[in-house]
Amino acid sequence: MSQMHQTLTLLAGRPDVAGALVFSEEGLTIAALLPPPLDPEATAAHAATIWRGIVTLSGVAGTGTPEELVMEGSDGVVIIRRLGPGVMVFVLAAGTDVPLGDLLHDLGRHAPALMAGA
């Protein structure tokens, strides 16, 4: 198992994380551990579309290149984070008591390993 897959497995194994996906800016799945009924290819395509919109909005707002998007919902959190040129990670955290700071710290800490082999 590659370093990227090992790290994705570690991240998706957190009790507050329901699944994770590494994808390209074109919306192609690189590696995925998502719960049913989430389809990795469809999730990657939608996440890439959202990311392109955030890049456009960031340009219009003059805030520079976005690094991370956090969407909090009533039943969980979705995080899309830029890992490096052309590669992103999507994390689905379930529940209403997600330790967001801890999860974001883990994502930052594991970003180089998630980028490895992408």
Image: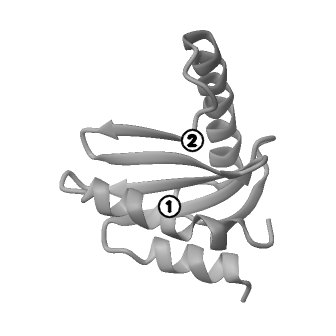
Locate residue 49, reporting x and y percent. Answer: 68, 31
Percent position (x, y) of residue 42? 68, 45
* Crowd rating for badge 1 (residues with CA inside 10 Å; few <14, some 14–19, many 20+): some
CB atoms of marks 1 and 2 within 8 Å: no
Furthest-left residue in this view: 97
Question: Which residue has dot 1 on it?
Answer: 108
Q: Residue at coordinates 64% horizontally, 73% vertically from top-left? A: 113
Looking at the rendered structure, the kind of residue marked 1 is Gly
Secondary structure found at label 1 = helix
For the point 59% across and 64% down, which residue is it? 111
Q: CA distance from mark 1 to mark 2?
A: 10 Å
Nearer to us in this view, 67 or 93: 67
Q: Amino acid at mark 2?
A: Glu
* Within-10-Å neighbours for mark 2: few <14, some 14–19, many 20+: some
What residue is disc 2 on?
Answer: 67
Q: Is residue 87 above or below residue 116?
A: above
* Location of the N terminus (image quadrant): bottom right
Q: Is residue 35 left or right of residue 86?
A: left
